[in-house]
Image (cartoon, rainbow, N blue to C red):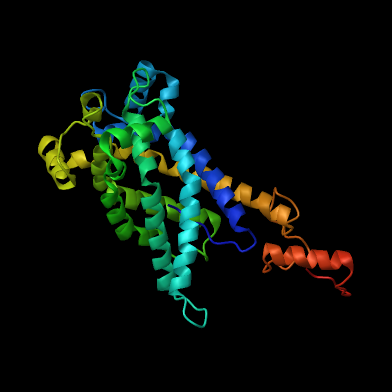
Amino acid sequence: MATWRRDGRLTGSQRLLCAGLAGTLSLSLTAPLELATVLAQVGVARGHARGPWAIGRRVWRAEGPRALWKGNGVACLRLFPCSAVQLAAYRKFVGLFTDDSGHISQQSSIMAGSLAGIVSTIVTYPTDLIKTRLIVQNMLEPSYKGILHAFSTVYQQEGFLALYRGVSLTILVYMNLEKIWNGPRDQFSLLQNFTTVCLAAVVTQTLSFPFDTVKRKMQAQSPYLPNYGGVDVHFSGAMDCFRQIVKAQGVLGLWNGLTANLLKVVPYFGVMFSTFEFCKRICLYQNGYIVSPLSYKLTPGVDQSLKPQELRELKKLFKTGKLKSKKPTL
């Protein structure tokens, strides 16, 4: 997941809200490309016309335009608990890694962020599996009637552990590739950050795509679904899945769906960055740091290093007359 510089002028809830709204909008606008990616990975599109546009057109004709957004609801709902769990876990790990003098090294801070990401991934992983199941099913003849029905059906038919099918691959990829996201970006402009994040996304997603393909097949495969969930190869585990894909389709079969996945990188992060920055300006304006939500022009006389609570307390002191100065500066 892409991250932004931590701005002390925003409260924790404001950062969570900005990130959640930005993620929801970017996910919704790129959902058809995500659908094409998952269907190509699972193998539902095998035997039909290949390519994201062909897959999308076939789904549109067979199930209607609304089917292009299958699974997007649960993907958006996952954002807020995932961010909340990650933030809480990060604070906990930072507290564990901080020494007696209150100092934490950069390496320990990165480690805390990585561990927090792993914790949030594990906690919210079942929602990712449900998203895959909702995507591969036919909306006209659904096996699941909705998100809650999908959760209860998978749990009752396949057991609790079925909700975590493929989670080990996700953690393995996260541990090895998360450091690419954690490069220092404080000295970069917004455009440079956007370019860096897009390039990092292309590299990490290309390298990790075979693992993601196996994970999607593991999530989709079920003896309780028509055609075993539409998976084009049958396997008994992660390693066997790798072998069966290479045996049936060659090594390049591990990268089926990569084109659609890379096509969504620029619009996804473009919408995410622009939405996040707009929401951030609104919050900074409400907190009193800037003069308008339409620009980053700073409010005269306001100390930008103050936290929102500290700024509010100073404003109260000035209003009550308890704090006076010839040149009032908040």
Instruction: Tell me, yes or no, if residue 182 can be seen here.
Output: no
Q: Residue at x 45, y 23 (%)?
A: 66
Relative placement, left or right, of 170 versus 324 is left
Task: Tell which of 257 and 127 is nearer to you.
Answer: 127
Instruction: Tell me, yes or no, if residue 47 can be seen here.
Output: yes
> Would you identify the image quadrant in which residue 112 lies?
bottom left
> Would you identify the image quadrant in which residue 108 lies?
bottom left
Q: Residue at x 51, y 47 (%)?
A: 80
- As displayed, is residue 237 above or below residue 8? above
Relative placement, left or right, of 261 versus 80 is left
Q: Position of residue 178 (x, y in %)?
A: 36, 58
Q: Position of residue 22 (x, y in %)?
A: 54, 44
Q: Position of residue 305 (x, y in %)?
A: 67, 69
Q: Quadrant of the C terminus?
A: bottom right
Task: Tell which of 163 and 297 is nearer to you.
Answer: 163
Q: Residue at x 84, y 71 (%)?
A: 328
Relative placement, left or right, of 234 versus 278 is left
> Would you identify the image quadrant in which residue 93 lies?
bottom left
Looking at this rendering, what residue extends furthest in the front direction?
156
Q: Residue at x 45, y 61 (%)?
A: 89
Looking at this rendering, what residue extends furthest in the bottom direction?
101
Q: How many marks?
A: 0
Q: Position of residue 3 (x, y in %)?
A: 48, 56
Task: Tell which of 307 and 261 is nearer to you.
Answer: 307
